[in-house]
Image (cartoon, rainbow, N blue to C red):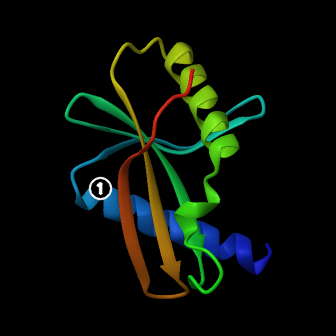
Amino acid sequence: MAEHNRLGKRGEEAAVAYLENQGYVIRHRNWHKNHLELDIVAEKEGELVVVEVKTRRNTEYIDPQDAVDWKKAHHIVVAADAYLKHFRLDMPVRFDIVSVVGTEEFEIHHIEDAFYPTF
């Protein structure tokens, strides 16, 4: 496994631990359906929370959350719609980003309502 993949996996582990510590119940990690993927699907207070995790070694070039452009957000929304249909869920959905910065010790920044569906 390439180093950047290992870092991403460790960052996602840190994000899951952070979310669980904040009272989120993790429903799925790396959920796939065809070409669609969701990093983390969680639940809190009757709301489905779709979380995109972005991990970077540092913020020298870009903040992790800035890597989620409109195109990436659109793909996440489409995947979330597929998730809702697949599990026949009828509940409010929120889209969050968790940015993780570091290599061993991580700085975690949770952005709630990071973006909204555009259709």
Residue 13, percent across and down?
48, 65
Name the amino acid type tagged 1. Answer: Glu
How busy is the neighbourhood of tag 1: few (under 14 within 10 Å), some, or many (20 plus)?
A: some
- Is disc 1 placed on a helix, strand or loop? helix
Residue 34, percent across and down?
77, 28
11 vs 24, left or right, is right
Does 118 sit above or below residue 97?
above
* Corner quadrant of residue 89: top left
* Corner quadrant of residue 73: top right
Identify the residue at image location x=29%, y=56%.
20
Residue carrying label 1: 20
Residue 8, percent across and down?
62, 69
101 vs 5, left or right, is left
Identify the residue at image location x=71%, y=70%.
5
**Residue 101 vs residue 8, the one in the foreground:** 101
65 vs 108, left or right, is right
Does 13 sit above or below residue 83?
below
Identify the residue at image location x=43%, y=69%.
14
Does 80 sit above or below residue 72?
above
Identify the residue at image location x=53%, y=58%.
53
- Quadrant of the frame with the N terminus: bottom right
33 vs 89, left or right, is right
Residue 72, percent across and down?
67, 45
- Quadrant of the frame with the C terminus: top right
* Corner quadrant of residue 57: bottom right
